[in-house]
Image (cartoon, rainbow, N blue to C red):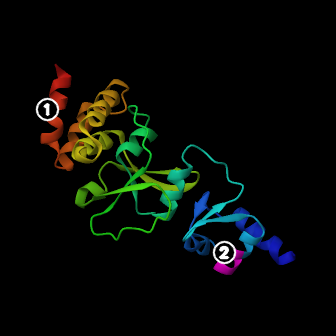
Amino acid sequence: MIEQTKIGDRFAEADLGAYFRPCDAEAVGISYPQLRRLEGLGLVEREGWGLYRKTHADITRHHTLAAVCARVPQAVICLLTALEVHDIGTQKPRHVWIAIPHKARVPTLGRLPVRITRFSSAALTYGVEDTDFEGVPARITTPARTVVDCFRFRSKIGLEPALEALHDALDDRRATPGQIWRAAEVCGARSLVEPALRMRSY
């Protein structure tokens, strides 16, 4: 009983988000056998292969994003999901859109509703900022970068959401024309974005 109390106290003090992997728990001093003990105590729940959740963690509208980011820590939240997080446009995606490095292996995600695309070179870092969802560290494209990506991947999401994102981002001052131009240049998408930006200026 005393040992269980100590494990419970250590878990309560650990810097873990609502969702985490066994290796995340080990990094803060909780071994896998101890993690299974915490599961038996009802303090954590197994959410799928390699993913656990704090039983009493508050559930927010971003709980699925938190689960995905815990399972794939190198992922970048992007495209329609980033639009929704930044409150740009009217898209309500059924899947969590993430980007992974171009040569990375496709992660095992179980039942998590995810759509995957790939970023390479400067696209992996430019216009990508740190954030968190339910205490889970995450990365997400900035508003300007998200707008540009919507044009880059218009074959996957459609041109209409890209145009809507551009107009709403500018109207709501989520991004400036200069920020969008710069992101388009870095990502090699200037020719895709330029016509829409020029139409906007008339």
Nearest to the observer: residue 44 or residue 25: 44
Q: Is residue 102 above or below residue 98?
A: below
**In the rendered structure, which segment of residues is drawn in magenta?**
31-36
Q: Which mark is residue 157?
A: none
Q: Are marks 2 and 1 in contact (CB under 8 Å)?
A: no
Whole-percent x and y of residue 105? 34, 71
Residue 61 lies left or right of residue 87; in this view the side is right
Q: Say what secondary structure mark 2 lies in.
A: loop
Whole-percent x and y of residue 125? 31, 56
**The quadrant where residue 100 appears:** bottom left
Whole-percent x and y of residue 146? 32, 43
Q: Mark 2 highlights which residue? A: 30
Quarter the N terminus occupies = bottom right
Whole-percent x and y of residue 22? 58, 73
Q: CA distance from mark 2 to mark 1?
A: 54 Å
Q: Mark 1 highlights which residue? A: 195
Residue at the (15%, 35%) spot, across then down: 194
Nearest to the observer: residue 168 or residue 131: 168
Number of numbered callouts drawn: 2
Q: Residue 33 colored magenta?
A: yes
Residue 182 lies left or right of residue 144; in this view the side is left
Q: Say what secondary structure mark 1 lies in.
A: helix
Nearest to the observer: residue 183 or residue 56: 56
- Type of amino acid at the residue the image marks with label 1: Pro
- Type of amino acid at the residue the image marks with label 2: Ile
